Protein backbone atom coordinates (compact mmCIF):
# COMPACT_ATOMS: atom_id res chain seq x y z
CA UNK A 1 0.00 0.00 0.00
CA UNK A 2 1.45 3.41 -0.96
CA UNK A 3 2.56 5.68 1.88
CA UNK A 4 3.15 9.46 1.93
CA UNK A 5 6.88 8.78 1.64
CA UNK A 6 6.30 7.22 -1.78
CA UNK A 7 5.47 10.71 -3.10
CA UNK A 8 8.95 12.05 -2.33
CA UNK A 9 11.36 12.53 -5.21
CA UNK A 10 14.69 10.74 -4.97
CA UNK A 11 16.89 13.61 -3.70
CA UNK A 12 14.29 14.54 -1.08
CA UNK A 13 13.91 10.93 0.06
CA UNK A 14 17.69 10.61 0.42
CA UNK A 15 17.85 13.83 2.44
CA UNK A 16 15.04 12.75 4.77
CA UNK A 17 16.70 9.38 5.33
CA UNK A 18 20.03 11.06 6.12
CA UNK A 19 18.38 13.40 8.61
CA UNK A 20 16.68 10.48 10.33
CA UNK A 21 19.94 8.52 10.51
CA UNK A 22 21.67 11.51 12.08
CA UNK A 23 19.21 11.29 14.99
CA UNK A 24 18.78 15.01 15.58
CA UNK A 25 16.22 15.74 18.32
CA UNK A 26 12.96 17.26 17.01
CA UNK A 27 13.00 21.04 17.27
CA UNK A 28 9.84 21.06 19.37
CA UNK A 29 11.59 19.00 22.08
CA UNK A 30 14.30 21.64 22.57
CA UNK A 31 14.40 24.83 24.63
CA UNK A 32 13.56 27.80 22.41
CA UNK A 33 17.08 29.23 22.16
CA UNK A 34 18.50 25.78 21.40
CA UNK A 35 15.82 25.27 18.75
CA UNK A 36 16.86 28.55 17.14
CA UNK A 37 20.49 27.50 17.12
CA UNK A 38 19.60 24.08 15.70
CA UNK A 39 17.61 25.69 12.88
CA UNK A 40 20.44 28.12 12.05
CA UNK A 41 22.92 25.26 11.92
CA UNK A 42 20.62 23.12 9.77
CA UNK A 43 20.08 25.90 7.24
CA UNK A 44 23.78 26.74 7.28
CA UNK A 45 24.83 23.29 6.09
CA UNK A 46 21.94 22.86 3.64
CA UNK A 47 21.56 26.10 1.73
CA UNK A 48 23.17 27.18 -1.53
CA UNK A 49 26.52 29.00 -1.39
CA UNK A 50 25.81 32.73 -1.07
CA UNK A 51 26.16 34.82 -4.21
CA UNK A 52 28.65 37.70 -4.11
CA UNK A 53 26.98 41.11 -4.47
CA UNK A 54 28.40 44.62 -4.83
CA UNK A 55 26.28 46.09 -2.03
CA UNK A 56 25.44 44.58 1.35
CA UNK A 57 24.35 46.93 4.11
CA UNK A 58 23.01 46.55 7.64
CA UNK A 59 20.59 49.14 9.01
CA UNK A 60 17.63 49.43 11.37
CA UNK A 61 14.00 50.43 10.97
CA UNK A 62 12.40 52.34 13.88
CA UNK A 63 9.06 51.26 15.34
CA UNK A 64 6.37 53.26 17.11
CA UNK A 65 7.19 51.55 20.44
CA UNK A 66 10.86 52.55 20.32
CA UNK A 67 12.26 49.28 19.02
CA UNK A 68 14.81 49.20 16.18
CA UNK A 69 14.21 46.35 13.72
CA UNK A 70 17.52 44.95 12.42
CA UNK A 71 17.52 44.82 8.61
CA UNK A 72 19.93 43.91 5.85
CA UNK A 73 20.01 45.12 2.27
CA UNK A 74 21.45 43.18 -0.65
CA UNK A 75 21.68 44.95 -4.00
CA UNK A 76 22.82 43.54 -7.35
CA UNK A 77 24.32 46.89 -8.39
CA UNK A 78 25.31 50.25 -6.97
CA UNK A 79 22.67 52.01 -9.10
CA UNK A 80 20.29 54.39 -7.39
CA UNK A 81 16.55 53.90 -7.66
CA UNK A 82 16.42 50.11 -7.62
CA UNK A 83 13.01 48.60 -6.84
CA UNK A 84 12.93 46.66 -3.60
CA UNK A 85 11.64 43.37 -2.23
CA UNK A 86 10.92 43.03 1.48
CA UNK A 87 11.72 39.40 2.32
CA UNK A 88 10.18 37.89 5.47
CA UNK A 89 11.86 34.74 6.78
CA UNK A 90 10.11 31.59 7.95
CA UNK A 91 10.41 29.66 11.20
CA UNK A 92 6.97 29.40 12.77
CA UNK A 93 7.27 32.93 14.24
CA UNK A 94 9.75 31.38 16.73
CA UNK A 95 13.01 30.55 14.91
CA UNK A 96 14.88 31.93 11.91
CA UNK A 97 16.29 35.33 11.03
CA UNK A 98 18.21 37.34 8.50
CA UNK A 99 21.05 34.82 8.49
CA UNK A 100 18.75 31.88 7.66
CA UNK A 101 17.33 33.60 4.58
CA UNK A 102 20.51 35.36 3.43
CA UNK A 103 21.58 32.84 0.78
CA UNK A 104 18.14 32.91 -0.83
CA UNK A 105 17.91 36.71 -0.66
CA UNK A 106 21.33 37.03 -2.30
CA UNK A 107 20.28 34.60 -5.02
CA UNK A 108 17.06 36.51 -5.71
CA UNK A 109 18.83 39.87 -5.79
CA UNK A 110 21.50 38.58 -8.16
CA UNK A 111 18.98 37.03 -10.56
CA UNK A 112 16.21 39.62 -10.45
CA UNK A 113 18.06 42.93 -10.59
CA UNK A 114 15.96 44.01 -7.60
CA UNK A 115 17.29 45.08 -4.19
CA UNK A 116 16.25 42.77 -1.35
CA UNK A 117 15.74 43.76 2.28
CA UNK A 118 15.24 41.17 5.03
CA UNK A 119 14.31 41.93 8.64
CA UNK A 120 14.79 40.33 12.02
CA UNK A 121 11.22 40.79 13.21
CA UNK A 122 10.64 40.06 16.88
CA UNK A 123 10.05 36.38 17.64
CA UNK A 124 7.77 34.42 19.94
CA UNK A 125 7.50 33.41 22.71
CA UNK A 126 9.18 36.60 23.93
CA UNK A 127 6.95 38.58 21.58
CA UNK A 128 3.58 37.01 20.83
CA UNK A 129 1.82 37.35 17.50
CA UNK A 130 1.03 39.96 16.12
CA UNK A 131 4.28 41.72 17.13
CA UNK A 132 5.97 40.04 14.15
CA UNK A 133 3.18 41.33 11.90
CA UNK A 134 3.54 44.84 13.34
CA UNK A 135 7.28 44.77 12.63
CA UNK A 136 6.72 43.52 9.08
CA UNK A 137 4.05 46.13 8.39
CA UNK A 138 6.24 48.89 9.86
CA UNK A 139 9.10 47.75 7.62
CA UNK A 140 6.98 47.71 4.47
CA UNK A 141 5.69 51.21 5.21
CA UNK A 142 9.22 52.42 5.94
CA UNK A 143 10.51 51.11 2.62
CA UNK A 144 7.60 52.75 0.81
CA UNK A 145 8.11 56.11 2.52
CA UNK A 146 11.82 56.17 3.46
CA UNK A 147 13.44 53.71 1.09
CA UNK A 148 14.80 56.66 -0.87
CA UNK A 149 17.20 57.32 2.03
CA UNK A 150 18.94 54.08 1.00
CA UNK A 151 18.77 54.94 -2.69
CA UNK A 152 15.81 52.62 -3.25
CA UNK A 153 12.61 53.27 -5.17
CA UNK A 154 9.88 52.70 -2.59
CA UNK A 155 7.18 53.19 -5.21
CA UNK A 156 8.27 49.92 -6.87
CA UNK A 157 7.80 47.51 -4.00
CA UNK A 158 7.16 43.79 -3.47
CA UNK A 159 6.94 41.51 -0.45
CA UNK A 160 7.71 37.81 -0.17
CA UNK A 161 8.27 35.20 2.49
CA UNK A 162 8.30 31.50 3.27
CA UNK A 163 6.10 29.58 5.72
CA UNK A 164 5.46 31.98 8.64
CA UNK A 165 7.02 34.66 6.46
CA UNK A 166 4.47 33.80 3.78
CA UNK A 167 1.71 34.31 6.33
CA UNK A 168 3.13 37.73 7.21
CA UNK A 169 3.59 38.64 3.53
CA UNK A 170 -0.02 37.80 2.72
CA UNK A 171 -1.28 39.76 5.72
CA UNK A 172 0.77 42.89 5.01
CA UNK A 173 -0.29 42.76 1.36
CA UNK A 174 -3.87 43.09 2.58
CA UNK A 175 -2.87 45.88 4.97
CA UNK A 176 -1.03 47.66 2.14
CA UNK A 177 -4.10 47.46 -0.08
CA UNK A 178 -6.23 49.01 2.66
CA UNK A 179 -3.63 51.75 3.28
CA UNK A 180 -3.19 52.57 -0.40
CA UNK A 181 0.44 51.46 -0.57
CA UNK A 182 1.07 49.93 -4.00
CA UNK A 183 2.65 46.45 -3.87
CA UNK A 184 3.55 45.02 -7.26
CA UNK A 185 3.84 41.38 -6.17
CA UNK A 186 3.36 39.16 -3.14
CA UNK A 187 5.56 36.06 -3.22
CA UNK A 188 4.12 33.38 -0.94
CA UNK A 189 6.16 30.23 -0.35
CA UNK A 190 4.14 27.48 1.39
CA UNK A 191 2.31 29.99 3.63
CA UNK A 192 0.12 29.14 6.60
CA UNK A 193 -3.09 31.08 5.95
CA UNK A 194 -5.49 29.45 8.42
CA UNK A 195 -5.37 27.75 11.81
CA UNK A 196 -6.96 24.55 13.06
CA UNK A 197 -8.25 23.24 9.72
CA UNK A 198 -7.25 19.70 8.77
CA UNK A 199 -6.88 19.92 5.00
CA UNK A 200 -6.17 16.83 2.91
CA UNK A 201 -2.47 17.68 2.67
CA UNK A 202 -2.36 18.09 6.45
CA UNK A 203 -4.00 14.68 6.95
CA UNK A 204 -1.57 13.09 4.50
CA UNK A 205 1.73 14.63 5.55
CA UNK A 206 1.46 16.00 9.12
CA UNK A 207 2.32 12.61 10.64
CA UNK A 208 4.61 11.33 7.87
CA UNK A 209 7.88 12.13 9.65
CA UNK A 210 8.94 14.87 7.23
CA UNK A 211 10.43 18.32 7.92
CA UNK A 212 7.19 19.81 9.24
CA UNK A 213 4.83 17.70 11.32
CA UNK A 214 1.86 18.21 13.60
CA UNK A 215 4.00 18.27 16.74
CA UNK A 216 6.20 21.06 15.44
CA UNK A 217 3.23 23.02 14.09
CA UNK A 218 1.47 22.76 17.45
CA UNK A 219 4.65 23.87 19.24
CA UNK A 220 5.03 26.91 16.98
CA UNK A 221 1.39 27.85 17.51
CA UNK A 222 1.60 27.42 21.29
CA UNK A 223 4.70 29.64 21.42
CA UNK A 224 3.23 32.42 19.30
CA UNK A 225 -0.41 32.74 20.35
CA UNK A 226 -1.64 34.92 23.17
CA UNK A 227 -1.06 38.42 21.82
CA UNK A 228 -3.61 41.15 21.13
CA UNK A 229 -4.85 40.10 17.72
CA UNK A 230 -7.15 42.86 16.47
CA UNK A 231 -8.52 40.88 13.53
CA UNK A 232 -8.51 37.10 13.09
CA UNK A 233 -7.40 37.50 9.46
CA UNK A 234 -4.20 39.17 10.61
CA UNK A 235 -3.05 35.61 11.40
CA UNK A 236 -5.36 33.84 8.95
CA UNK A 237 -5.31 35.80 5.68
CA UNK A 238 -7.57 33.21 4.05
CA UNK A 239 -10.54 34.46 6.10
CA UNK A 240 -10.06 38.15 5.27
CA UNK A 241 -13.43 39.75 4.41
CA UNK A 242 -12.23 40.52 0.89
CA UNK A 243 -9.16 39.78 -1.23
CA UNK A 244 -10.21 42.11 -4.04
CA UNK A 245 -7.54 44.55 -5.12
CA UNK A 246 -4.66 42.91 -3.29
CA UNK A 247 -1.27 42.58 -5.01
CA UNK A 248 -0.80 39.92 -7.70
CA UNK A 249 0.62 36.73 -6.24
CA UNK A 250 3.38 34.28 -7.05
CA UNK A 251 2.83 31.16 -4.93
CA UNK A 252 5.35 28.33 -4.61
CA UNK A 253 4.42 25.13 -2.77
CA UNK A 254 6.02 21.84 -1.78
CA UNK A 255 3.90 18.87 -2.82
CA UNK A 256 4.62 16.78 0.29
CA UNK A 257 3.85 19.45 2.87
CA UNK A 258 1.03 19.69 5.43
CA UNK A 259 0.62 23.33 4.29
CA UNK A 260 0.31 22.59 0.56
CA UNK A 261 -3.47 22.89 0.57
CA UNK A 262 -3.28 26.17 2.49
CA UNK A 263 -1.41 27.62 -0.48
CA UNK A 264 -3.84 26.13 -2.97
CA UNK A 265 -6.83 27.50 -1.07
CA UNK A 266 -5.27 30.93 -0.90
CA UNK A 267 -4.58 30.89 -4.63
CA UNK A 268 -8.23 30.00 -5.21
CA UNK A 269 -9.44 32.81 -2.93
CA UNK A 270 -7.27 35.35 -4.74
CA UNK A 271 -8.35 34.15 -8.17
CA UNK A 272 -12.01 34.28 -7.12
CA UNK A 273 -11.42 37.92 -6.17
CA UNK A 274 -9.91 38.65 -9.59
CA UNK A 275 -6.30 38.80 -8.40
CA UNK A 276 -3.69 37.47 -10.88
CA UNK A 277 -2.02 34.36 -9.44
CA UNK A 278 0.88 32.24 -10.62
CA UNK A 279 0.94 28.93 -8.70
CA UNK A 280 3.77 26.41 -8.89
CA UNK A 281 3.85 23.13 -6.95
CA UNK A 282 7.28 21.51 -6.75
CA UNK A 283 6.72 17.73 -7.03
CA UNK A 284 8.11 15.39 -4.40
CA UNK A 285 9.48 18.18 -2.20
CA UNK A 286 8.92 18.97 1.48
CA UNK A 287 8.45 22.04 3.65
CA UNK A 288 11.52 24.30 3.91
CA UNK A 289 13.05 22.87 0.73
CA UNK A 290 14.04 26.38 -0.40
CA UNK A 291 16.81 26.29 2.22
CA UNK A 292 18.20 22.93 1.07
CA UNK A 293 19.84 23.88 -2.21
CA UNK A 294 23.01 21.90 -1.51
CA UNK A 295 20.90 18.74 -1.75
CA UNK A 296 17.67 19.58 -3.60
CA UNK A 297 17.65 21.04 -7.14
CA UNK A 298 14.16 22.44 -6.58
CA UNK A 299 15.55 25.09 -4.20
CA UNK A 300 17.53 27.05 -6.80
CA UNK A 301 14.71 26.41 -9.28
CA UNK A 302 12.31 28.25 -6.98
CA UNK A 303 14.80 31.05 -6.34
CA UNK A 304 15.08 31.58 -10.09
CA UNK A 305 11.32 31.44 -10.66
CA UNK A 306 10.61 34.01 -7.93
CA UNK A 307 13.42 36.24 -9.24
CA UNK A 308 11.89 36.14 -12.72
CA UNK A 309 8.45 37.01 -11.33
CA UNK A 310 9.97 39.97 -9.47
CA UNK A 311 11.79 41.15 -12.58
CA UNK A 312 8.55 41.08 -14.58
CA UNK A 313 6.61 42.88 -11.83
CA UNK A 314 9.15 45.54 -10.88
CA UNK A 315 11.49 46.24 -13.80
CA UNK A 316 10.41 47.89 -17.03
CA UNK A 317 10.66 45.72 -20.11
Image: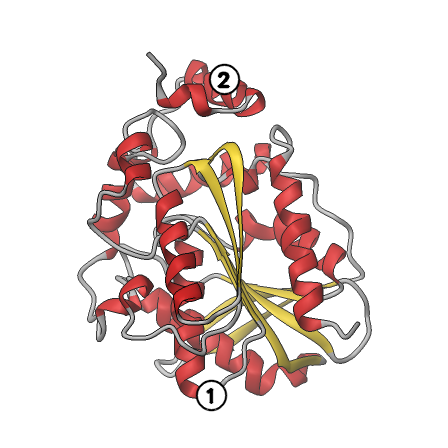
The reply to whether residue 74 is visible in this rendering is no
Q: Is residue 160 left or right of residue 287?
A: right
Residue shown at the point (29%, 70%) measured from the top left: 240
Q: State the image coordinates of residue 122 (x, y, percent, origin top left).
A: 38, 63
The answer to which quarter of the image holds residue 121 is bottom left
Q: Position of residue 272 (x, y in %)?
A: 39, 66
Q: Secondary structure at mark 2?
A: helix
Identify the secondary structure beneath mark 1.
loop
Q: Earlier in the sequence, mark 2 or mark 1?
A: 2
In contact (CB < 8 Å): disc 2 and disc 1: no
Q: Residue at x 24, y 50 (%)?
A: 221
Which corner quadrant holds the C terminus? bottom right
Q: Position of residue 105 (x, y in %)?
A: 63, 55
Q: Residue at x 47, y 61 (%)?
A: 120
| Numbered disc total | 2
| Quadrant in the rendering for residue 72 | bottom right
* Real-space Cα separation, disc 2 to disc 1, in angstroms: 48 Å
Q: Position of residue 211 (x, y in %)?
A: 40, 32
Residue 94 vertical placement versus 148 (above, below): above
**Image disc number at residue 18:** 2
As drawn, the label of residue 180 is: 1
Q: Quadrant of the N terminus?
A: top left
169, above or below 218, in the image? below
- Residue 181 visible to an observer of this rendering: yes
Q: Is residue 147 left or right of residue 186?
A: right
Amino acid sequence: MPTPLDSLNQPTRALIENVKRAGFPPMNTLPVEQARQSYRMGVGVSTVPPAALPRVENFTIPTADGHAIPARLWAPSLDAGLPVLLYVHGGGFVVGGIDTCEAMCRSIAAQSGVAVVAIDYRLAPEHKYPVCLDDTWTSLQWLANQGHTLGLNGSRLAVAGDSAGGTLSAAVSLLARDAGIPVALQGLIYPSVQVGVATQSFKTYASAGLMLDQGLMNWFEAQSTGGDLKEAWHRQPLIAPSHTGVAPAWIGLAECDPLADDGRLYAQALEKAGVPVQLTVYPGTVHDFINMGRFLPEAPQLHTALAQALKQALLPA
